[in-house]
Image: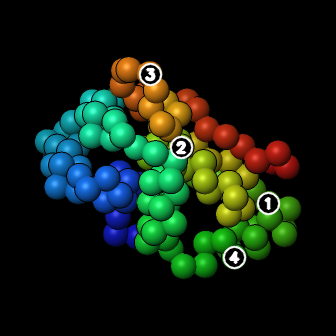
Amino acid sequence: MRGSAAAVEISRQLGVSAEIAELERDFLVRGMEPDEFAVRARELWAELTEAQVAAAFEGAPWLSGIEEVWADIRSRGEYCAVISLSPDFFVERLLAWGAHAAHGSRWPAVPFLEPGGAGGDLERGRESEDH
């Protein structure tokens, strides 16, 4: 993604852009830990829906041609993977674009039905069936 981040795009859908900008500053400049960022973002996104995640993903400023690059990689029998600090529920959408694996920070499923924070430990991700 160019010039943005999943958290920014998701927050735009919820009308909390100023709040996420402050969290991003805390993370980038003030050294906030990823797990604290995730817990605070989860609070901002308490009402997040699957439709808003889809809109955030579809409206994000993705690098042009990424699907074609991944198709070329796959056509040669090679593999491509994405590893990101972004929420897994966002990153895993890249599997449909041709990534063999997409790993993001662990988050509860959307909508958030259980109280508590998000993971942030990069342990969870999904892989395509033909990896």
Q: Which kind of residue does numbered mark 1 sit on?
A: Glu
Image point (58%, 42%), residue name: 103
Image point (84%, 69%), residue name: 75
Q: Check disc 4 and report the residue beneath it.
A: 68
Q: Which of the two marks, 1 or 4, is nearer to us in this view?
A: 4
Q: Which kind of residue does numbered mark 2 sit on?
A: Phe
Ranked by sequence position, the earlier of labels 2 and 1 is 1
Give the image location of residue 123, x and y in percent.
Answer: 55, 30
Q: Residues within 10 Å of mark 4 (few under 14, many from 20)?
A: few
Badge 2 marks a residue whose secondary structure is helix
Asked whether, in this view, residue 57 is left or right of residue 97, the answer is: left
Q: Residues within 10 Å of mark 3 (few under 14, many from 20)?
A: few
Q: Which of the two marks, 1 or 3, is nearer to us in this view?
A: 3
Q: Which of the two marks, 2 or 3, is nearer to us in this view?
A: 3
Instruction: Evaluate if marks 4 and 2 touch, with contact meaning CB atoms under 8 Å apart.
Output: no
The quadrant where residue 42 appears: top left
Distance in Å between CA atoms under marks 2 and 1 = 25 Å
Q: Check disc 1 and report the residue beneath it.
A: 78
Residue 30 visible in rendering: yes
Badge 1 marks a residue whose secondary structure is loop
Q: Which mark is residue 89?
A: 2
Q: Which kind of residue does numbered mark 3 sit on?
A: Glu
Give the image location of residue 116, x and y in percent.
Answer: 36, 21
Q: Residues within 10 Å of mark 2 (few under 14, many from 20)?
A: many
Q: Which mark is residue 114?
A: 3
Give the image location of residue 5, x and y in percent.
Answer: 37, 58
Ranked by sequence position, the earlier of labels 4 and 3 is 4
Give the image location of residue 84, x and y in percent.
Answer: 48, 47
Distance in Å between CA atoms under marks 4 and 3 = 38 Å
Distance in Å between CA atoms under marks 1 and 4 = 14 Å
Ranked by sequence position, the earlier of labels 1 and 3 is 1
